[in-house]
Image (cartoon, rainbow, N blue to C red):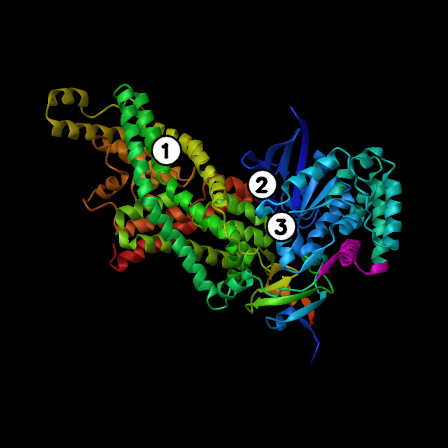
Amino acid sequence: MKKEVLPLTRVPAEKEVVLISIEAGWGLRRRLLDMGLREGQRFKILHAHRPGPSIILVGNTRLVLGHGMAHKILVKEA
Amino acid sequence: MGKKVTIALAGNPNAGKSSIFNNLTRSRQHVGNYPGVTVEKMEGSLKYGQYDINVVDLPGTYSLTAHSLDELVARNFVIEEKPDVVIDIIDASNLERNLYLATQFIELGVPLVLAFNMTDIADEGGFIIDKNRLSELLGTPIVFTVATKKKGMDELLDQAIALFEGKTKLQGTVVRYGKEIQEEILKLESVAIKDPSIVQKYPSRWLATKLLEGDSEVIKQLEHSPHYEEIISQAKKSTQHLEAIFGDKPEAIIAERRYGFISGACSEAVQRTYEIRHSASDEIDKVLVNRILGLPIFLGLVWAMFKLTFTLSQPLMSGIELLIQRLSLIFSALLPQGSVIQSLVVNGIIAGVGSVLVFAPVIFLLFLALAALEDSGYMARAAFIMDRLMHKIGLHGRSFIPMLLGFACNLPAIMATRTIDDRRDRLVTILINPFMSCGARLPVYALFIGAFFPARMAGTALFSLYLLGITVAIIMAKVFRKYLFKGEAAPFVMELPPYRMPTFKGLLIHMWERGAVYLKKAGTVIFAGSILIWALSNLPWNVEYSKDYDFMLKKAQQNQELIMQLENEKASEKLEKSYVASVGRVLAPAFKPLGFGDWRIATALVGGFVAKEIVVAMLGTLYSSSEAEQKSASLRLALQKQSRPDGKKMFTPLVAYSFMAFVLLYIPCMATIAVIKHETNSWVWPAFAAFYTTAVAWIVSFIIYQGGKLLGLG
């Protein structure tokens, strides 16, 4: 059960995670990369309005991720 | 005259770029556009020692690719205009991501100074940055700044000038992408170098990298080169080779390597002693973006914004009204009595433009409130809160910002849809945007609500109109999503800025930027529209009257009552025989089922295509012409007095509401249509928008009026 790779949408708020991969085309990956989200990046889930968007804390930046986008991001609990 | 230096400011959104720009240039600023595009270009100037410095504020970007217009504008400015120095403003508390843009400037080989801004927040966050070491690793000067406290500004300018004068030199740091990519870069460079005109403009290594990244703009620029075929075929070969090795696009690998370069530099020069887990922003967010509280708080704020706007603007409006009346009296006395010119100036220009300017306080206060929401950082939270709801209509939270901006003006709102990557999302957002009740409709509401609704209901009536617009927009978005643009909404990602206390100066600047657009419209389109309407309603000037009014007026002598009656009759008859009446009469029957089949209203609605506030200007001109004896009476009273042929009142609250709904929903103004044409690059969508909105308006007003009558409200 522990340290399972999950879509971000299945991790509850307040958890810290490590990004494992982004299961999307390059266009989306590029946008996330531009905003500092890449493989191996640690971040924290601050808010999650499911089924709806999440707010995550990457470095000192807060990003809003839509539900569809969050679903394509695979993470592991840190 | 000092030496001229041009500095370009670049940086991520929210890194403090505009604060630094304001600190440097203070009040000597002006706003323009980059040539050929509608991206705003802020420029400012300052004198520093013997230097005359021109500062250009580039659009805030995360990267320098050709994927977004803002990025392309920033990049092209740096390449084409060759500013003497580029200052990249870096959020020091979020180094790695911010340095991603910096590495791209380093690759481009531009004279670069890095301003590590918000170092106070970085300190609080436990970051210890070894400035000299990091500067060595990146090969560029670094200056620590705190823009909000105006710290480091002089040092920033000193470093920029040292670079300009050649006292400091860039070390020409090369970001290494690994052996495989390096080999292909060398191959591409050797081909590109055959055309000296290209490598003069672009550094060859940068060009080769961009070709591997498949940069569409660079490829387009090369089209005229005699070596185009050769370069492109080598680029294709190299790309395929790298894809075979890495199993991914070279663009992705290069981006990863850039981050690798940054991580390497940061691990050497940056320490983090401790981590703070929660900022004040997070504490505020616990309430404001709360799952349950978020939406009601948001709706409450918007309602309060409108209520406050309406209340505060009342005394200001009375003041302006008084001023316009004075002006009208002065010009009446100055110009020859009964002449064409007197009529044009007093009834055309002053009455027309004046009846629109009266609403300037409402519009400016609304812009002020919007600026407060934006500058405080709340606007982005609104997008988050609304995402779940927006998703239900097949859009996402990002479409919400253009819709919210639509409440101020549909023009910037439709332009703001550029941030939406997906074409279908974008088109739906553009097409439903005109239903967002813009500031220009407000004069119409203010007039009719003021005239036909009791004061205690004014706020609610206004709010309900905005809700009506939103409801119609939602329904249309669903319809479009289902039948016109099928498929899923594109994913949504956006940065949340930290909460900030808006500065008074900042709010005023933002209010003025938007308000100026409105005033400009009043001075140009509405001015011209007022003259046109005056001409249509006063020409032909010499009408063949059914009675000899002049003779009868002379005979009436001192009988004031008779004179008034005769003048009134004369004016009405003149108007009935004017050109405008013919247009209105043709259209009026179409509005009869909506409760307002009056030719004057029909005519005003035609004028509303120029700009929606012209509806008020036209009603002002039309009613002041027919009420010649009552020049001083406000339009509000004139409207209340209007009656139908059967003697009943022309306007009941129900008719007024049906009319306001129609004004809200029908054909977007000329400028909006022009922007839709510009943004969609086709006449199909503006034509479609004009037609379908008018059809929707007719249907909705029909339901309101006929439904209301059935319920006994009429």
Label 2 sits on what residue type?
Asn
- Residue beneath disc 3: B15
Task: Out of B255 and B604, give the one closest to the viewer.
Answer: B255
Query: Residue B268 colored magenta?
Result: yes
Q: Does the residue at mark 2 contact the one at mark 1 (Cβ under 8 Å)?
A: no
Q: Are marks 3 and 2 on the same chain?
A: yes
* As drawn, B522 above or below B135: above
- Residue beneath disc 1: B353
Q: Does the residue at mark 3 contact the one at mark 2 (Cβ under 8 Å)?
A: no
Chain that bears disc 1: B
Residue lying at the far bottom in this picture: please name it.
A1
Q: Are marks 3 and 1 on the same chain?
A: yes
- Residue beneath disc 2: B23
Locate residue B288 relative to residue B195 in the image: left or right.
left
Q: Is residue B689 visible?
A: yes
The region drawn magenta spans: B245-272
Q: In the rendering, at what x and y percent does residue B268 appear?
A: 78, 57
